[in-house]
Amino acid sequence: MFHKDPCVFAGYPIDPLDELRGNEKILNSMFRADSTRFIIYRDGSPMMDVSAGLEPCYFNLSEIDVINHVFLGKDENFTYFAAEVTNVIEEHTNRKYVDLRTIAREIAANGFSGMPSLLAKGKMLLDWHTRHNYCANCGAKTNCIKGGHSRLCGECETEHFPRVDPVVIMMVVRGDKCLLGRSPHFLPGVYSALAGFMEPGETIEEAVRREVWEEAGIEVGKVDYIKSQPWPFPSSLMIGTICEALNEDINIDNDELEDAKWFDKKVLQEVLDEGGNDQFRVPERLAIARHLLEYHLLETWIKDQVD
Ligand SMILES: [Zn+2]
């Protein structure tokens, strides 16, 4: 069943070899090896070979002028780096820079693949390098170290690590019904799971209860973790949960949502089977919200204890 599969952007497909990140000598020789494959990005989009399916275009170091690079790891045959380059690599019929959502959507339509995870890691780390040229501690220039997995300040020697922003996303359930909301920027008819950034000092359960109360005026009891999804726009981790609503009267926060409703399982199943329309449709398979919705429809969730 689909909801039991890993989410898109999960399932890193190669060995990240993180034990080598402190070994500049080995990293440097891998960076310069003729067989090393570079995946290049422009504005967060990797260049893809679109001639047959959708595969990354691989470049050799001699073809590119690298500004920032990230060591991605190795498979049985090759070493992989993600790179941002200064020379212009033109698109043509067979190769294009493709937005990661488009890549993930097309690849996910053919079953699970770890490729979006590899491409997402490159994007997230290259984005981070672009935005962290200066030290947050003293303002001096920072330099990329450890194969692009951290940056070191040239003045105060503070080491800076890539950030990940945790987001809670929740299927709020009451009996056979679940609560879905609509943000103004959603495509027509789409209702999805409520979600929000965690705040410093919160547990996952506390963040779920706060968000659902703030956005919809619903009090939440038990919260269970289901699964998670890296989300590279720009660098979040979606923490998927299912939780129990203790009341039914919705009171929406109009700054966050334009609508929220309870949907019963029969209606949701019909929309899943038939695809929905501009009045009501569910999130696409790219999104963890779809996994949570299918979990609610197909699994028995036991709410017999409150933590
Ligand atoms: Zn500094």
Image: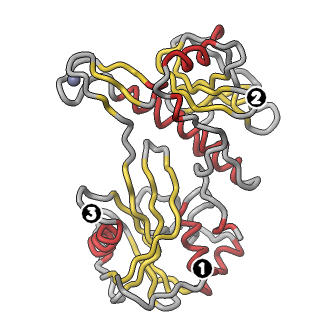
Residue drawn at the location 54% of the way across and 62% of the way down: 288
Instruction: Give the percent coordinates (x, y) of residue 297.
Output: 60, 81
Q: Which residue is mark 1?
A: 268
Instruction: Give the percent coordinates (x, y) of residue 95.
Output: 71, 25
Looking at the image, residue 297 lies above or below residue 203: below
Residue drawn at the location 49% of the way across and 18% of the way down: 24
Which of disc 3 and disc 1 is earlier in sequence? 3
**Residue type for callout 1:** Leu
The disc placed on residue 77 is 2
Q: Quadrant of residue 239?
A: bottom left
The crowd level at tag 1 (other Cα within 10 Å; few <14, some 14-19, many 20+) is many
**Residue type for callout 2:** Asn
Which of disc 2 and disc 3 is earlier in sequence? 2
Q: Give the Cα separation between the discs numbered 2 and 1.
A: 45 Å
The answer to whether the residues at label 1 and label 3 have Cβ atoms under 8 Å apart is no
Question: In front: 298, or 285?
Answer: 298
Instruction: Give the percent coordinates (x, y) of residue 17.
Output: 57, 34
Which of disc 1 and disc 2 is earlier in sequence? 2
Secondary structure beneath label 1: helix
Q: Quadrant of ligand 1?
A: top left
Instruction: Give the percent coordinates (x, y) of residue 264.
Output: 54, 86
User: Residue pushed farthest left?
Assistant: 138
User: Residue pushed farthest top?
Assistant: 62
Instruction: Name the side, left or right, on which 196 lies relative to 229.
Output: left
Residue drawn at the location 55% of the way across and 27% of the way down: 71
The disc placed on residue 202 is 3
Secondary structure beneath label 2: loop
Q: Quadrant of residue 182?
A: bottom left
Q: Nearer the viewer, mark 2 or mark 1?
A: 2
